[in-house]
Image (spheres, rainbow, N blue to C red):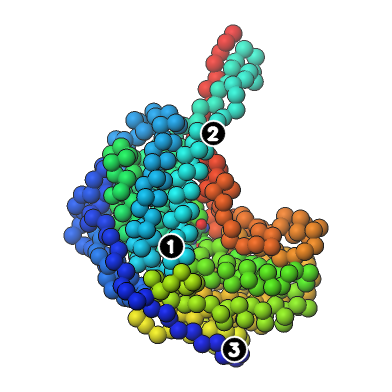
Amino acid sequence: MTTTDTASFTVRRAEAALTPSLPPFGQFIGGAFVASSSTATVDVENPATEEILMQVPSGSVEDVDAAVAAAVAAKADWAARTPKERSSVLLRIADIIEANRELLETLEAANTGKPAAVAEDDISSAIDTFRFSAGATRAFTTPGADDYAQNHTSVILREPVGVVGVITPWNYPLLMAAWKIAPVLGAGNTLVLKPSEQTPLTTLKLAELIASEIPAGVLNIVTGPGRVVGNRLSEHPDVDLVAITGSVGSGQKVAASAASTVKRVHLELGGKAPVVVFDDADLEAAAKGVREAGFWNGGQECGAACRVLVHESVAEKFTELLVREVSDITVGAPGAGDDVEIGSMISGDHYKRVLAALDDLRKEGLTIAVGGNALEGPGYFIEPTVVTDVPAGAAIASTEIFGPVVSVETFSTEEEAITRANETVYGLAASVWTTNAARSLSVPRRLDFGTVWVNSHLVIANEMPWGGFKGSGYGRDLSTYALEDFSRTKHVMYNCG
Ligand code: NAD
């Protein structure tokens, strides 16, 4: 291992401790917080201070069954509401989140260790997701009726799927919940959501805040472990579709459990996004782009710009610019200022996983150009890191580290860049950096990823779909494609002869 940079990082601490407003204790079932059938609990930690914020129930199969029964009971009434009525509920939810923005940002930051800028963006994006889905719910129409067989008129009915099970991850707890709740409810389904065991607090808080605005049973939240609560949702005979945002392994387990009842599955899984920088690129813009999109949320981001492939003729210049950008990143705890860019890792376990990956890179003899070390606690902080001289086929090029680590490889031809970028099990997102117009049109078409940015990375719009190919799963979040995914179509044919 070679370390080439002298940048030194420290964790900037908040002057005053965060005082988050915590949600009630219990499972949110049938419109109210109720006791779990299990007395076991899970500690929910502030990963920037290692303090326990509160405990939540470690839910049981019985809790899931009660929540699904509540969702089944609420199904017919919610499905019978007009799009206009459902839309007005989504708009009301958006208004409530906005009115409680500060409270939710503080709670999210306390539970994840993310900086103010990220927490603020998460809550703003969640508000926009509800507003977009409210509009899309009303604008979402089917093709007009027509005759396709002699004397027969065909009509397409768009119906809700029924009860949807939703399983969310820890990196954007409230935002990932919003990405599912808004289109699932907009399309007329009821749902049971299981948040990540590490980060259930904002989802529970949302339920508390909106309880009086939604009919009982339409939205239910059950906390607990994936292998119990998540698995029961996946196999439950009365759950009609199960949607998970999480790792590939969890997605595979969900899909396998769902197979027993042949329910529909919606998978938003991991990623390892290549950033292809051509010799004609604006290198300063590309380096700044990687600073923002590679280290956003501490790199705990499925679309993170974490794997740079740069043309060999500009590799030295680009790496110098990138190292300069990354050396300047501010690390800090929530509450330590609006300019903090990187917070803590989500948990002690994840922190150890990222450090073990860095150790492996050292053992492989790769160059750590900047960062590479743990930072002083309390809290699970790791230096922003750039790894260079990565050879083709190295493990880091294809393994999701999910931390503040960006690797740099080089290529010699456009053909090689495309082949190498596609050499990953993931297919979530990629970016191409070039000033050549023809290349900006042709290369994205040949990249096997659900989103490809040109001269940008990680810009997301509610109007546009988000989702992967290959190991990153199938199904789309955001846009009218999400409404489509959470609906079913029925063909009704009338004999008019
Ligand atoms: P994870 O897979 O460990 O957990 C995700 C959720 O799945 C949690 O709620 C967990 O309890 C649940 N789960 C775990 N095992 C389960 C099982 N057997 N059955 C049912 N549910 C189960 O993922 P994580 O560590 O919380 O999140 C990080 C992962 O999520 C990364 O791989 C990241 O790329 C991915 N992610 C993807 C997107 C996307 O849009 N594609 C967005 C965010 C995160």
Q: Are marks 1 and 2 in contact (CB under 8 Å)?
A: no
* Residue to which mark 2 is pinned: 139
The mark nearer the N terminus, 3 or 1, is: 3
- In the displayed structure image, the side of residue 478 where residue 23 appears, left or right: left
For the point 48% across and 53% down, the residue is: 125
* Residue to which mark 1 is pinned: 119
User: Which image quarter is the N terminus in?
Assistant: bottom right
The mark nearer the N terminus, 1 or 2, is: 1
- In the displayed structure image, the side of residue 213 where residue 433 appears, left or right: right
For the point 43% across and 56% down, the residue is: 123
Secondary structure of the residue carrying tag 2 is helix
Q: Can residue 388 be seen?
A: yes
The mark nearer the N terminus, 2 or 3, is: 3
Q: Can residue 419 be seen?
A: no
Mark 2 to mark 3 CA distance (whole Å): 54 Å
Q: Position of residue 237 (x, y in %)?
A: 35, 42
Q: Which mark is residue 172?
A: none
* Residue to which mark 3 is pinned: 5
- In the displayed structure image, the side of residue 17 where residue 37 appears, left or right: left
Mark 3 to mark 1 CA distance (whole Å): 30 Å
Q: Position of residue 190 (x, y in %)?
A: 37, 40
Q: Amino acid at mark 2?
A: Ala
**Nearest to viewer (mark 3 / mark 1):** 1
- Outermost residue to the top: 497
